[in-house]
């Protein structure tokens, strides 16, 4: 099988290093965030071209609220502006946007712009672009537990019927496939509270490239690396051997 034949169904990216990129260029950190928009366009185009069905981008973590007010404000303004400016291009490419995260802490203006982007791209059938905004994986897990507990307490759910599928359906990512590949830029090797449940068996790919410098070639390099990985899911033997063993059971 050639490298290009094994395309992940779902790629998730932790877009890190905007601040350091700006500092290295003697610019304000906010300029790094502005320069981080072009690589987003690039990875969306590349994902569409490769037939990747789902692309999740970590754009703002719940912990990021702890940054200086001026930086948070600049990011909010950028989200608002991009939600409006990128819409036509996303629609043209057949992209459907879905937002995961808390969203209650966003201003009405930011929320409306993001929700308009979701609403006006519902017909996109080529790529689901998931934007993780005010996202915390632990908050997502706690929220799912709380919702299921509430249903059980109200007598609408038998706790014995809660299995992995049911639990996954209570997460913000309900209905999406698990990520096959998680890429993080900027040299950091951690998940920073991102998709902890969903990425249980994802392949991880770390690159030193800072997000504003991330190119199509860098994305393709990660896809090639993914294609070479041996995904065993705890088993031994080739996928065909595993399948045969399952059938024999
Ligand atoms: C990622 O870049 C963007 C967001 C978290 C919003 P950073 O802003 O974290 O950049 P570094 O890590 O400080 O370089
Ligand atoms: C993770 O990056 C969040 C996003 C990329 C949106 P951070 O820069 O916030 O994470 P840490 O602080 O390095 O863990
Ligand atoms: Mg960072």
Image (tube, rainbow, N blue to C red):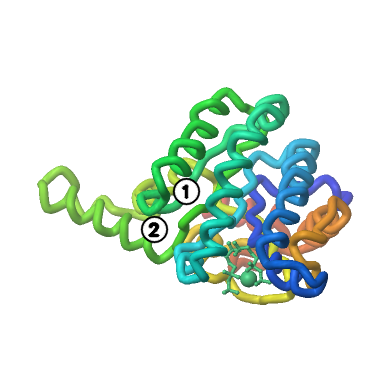
Residue extending furthest toward the left: 154
Q: Please provide percent x and percent y for residue 174.
A: 43, 44
The residue carrying mark 1 is: 100
Q: Residue at x 51, y 33 (%)?
A: 118
> What whole-number distance in Å separates the C-alpha atoms at marks 1 and 2?
9 Å
- Asked if residue 204 shows in the view, the reply is no
Q: Position of residue 166 (x, y in %)?
A: 35, 49
- In the image, taking residue 223 as reference, residue 142 lies left or right, namely left
**Ligand 2 neighbours mark 2 (CB distance < 8 Å):** no
Image quarter for residue 145?
bottom left
Q: Is mark 1 within 8 Å of ligand 2?
A: no
Q: Residue at x 39, y 55 (%)?
A: 164
SS for callout 2: helix
* Mark 2 Cα shell of 10 Å, populated few (<14), some (14-19), many (≥20): many
Disc number at residue 246? none
Displayed quadrant of residue 217: bottom right
Tell me which image quadrant ligand 1 sits in. Answer: bottom right
Q: Tell me residue 190's x, y (percent).
A: 61, 75
The residue labelled by disc 2 is: 140
Describe residue 178's horizontal placement relative to residue 105 as left or right: right
Q: Quadrant of residue 225?
A: bottom right
Q: Does 237 sit above or below residue 156?
A: below
Q: Residue at x 29, y 53 (%)?
A: 162
- Relative placement, left or right, of 98 versus 111 is right
Q: Evaluate whether residue 197 shows in this view.
A: yes
Residue 143: % across, % down? 31, 57
Residue beneath the point at 54% across and 26% down: 120
CB within 8 Å, label 1 to label 2? yes
């Amino acid at each position: 099988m050639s490298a290009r034949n094994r395309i992940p169904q779902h790629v998730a990216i932790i877009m890190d290093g905007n601040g350091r990129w700006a500092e290295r260029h003697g610019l304000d950190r906010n300029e790094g965030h502005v320069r981080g928009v072009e690589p987003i366009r690039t990875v969306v185009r590349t994902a569409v071209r490769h037939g990747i069905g789902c692309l999740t981008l970590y754009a703002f973590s719940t912990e990021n609220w702890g940054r200086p007010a001026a930086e948070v404000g600049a990011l909010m303004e950028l989200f608002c502006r991009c939600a409006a400016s990128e819409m036509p291009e996303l629609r043209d490419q057949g992209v459907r946007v879905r937002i995961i995260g808390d969203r209650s802490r966003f201003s009405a203006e930011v929320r409306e712009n993001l929700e308009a982007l979701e609403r006006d791209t519902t017909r996109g059938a080529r790529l689901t672009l998931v934007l993780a905004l005010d996202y915390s994986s632990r908050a997502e897990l706690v929220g799912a537990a709380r919702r299921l507990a509430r249903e059980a307490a109200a007598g609408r759910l038998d706790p014995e019927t809660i299995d992995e599928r049911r639990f996954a359906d209570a997460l913000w990512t309900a209905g999406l496939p698990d990520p096959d590949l998680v890429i993080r830029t900027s040299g950091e090797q951690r998940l920073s509270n991102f998709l902890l449940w969903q990425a249980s068996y994802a392949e991880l790919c770390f690159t030193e490239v800072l997000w504003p410098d991330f190119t199509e070639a860098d994305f393709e390099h990660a896809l090639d690396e993914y294609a070479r990985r041996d995904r065993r899911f705890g088993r031994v033997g080739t996928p065909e051997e595993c399948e045969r063993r399952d059938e024999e059971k």
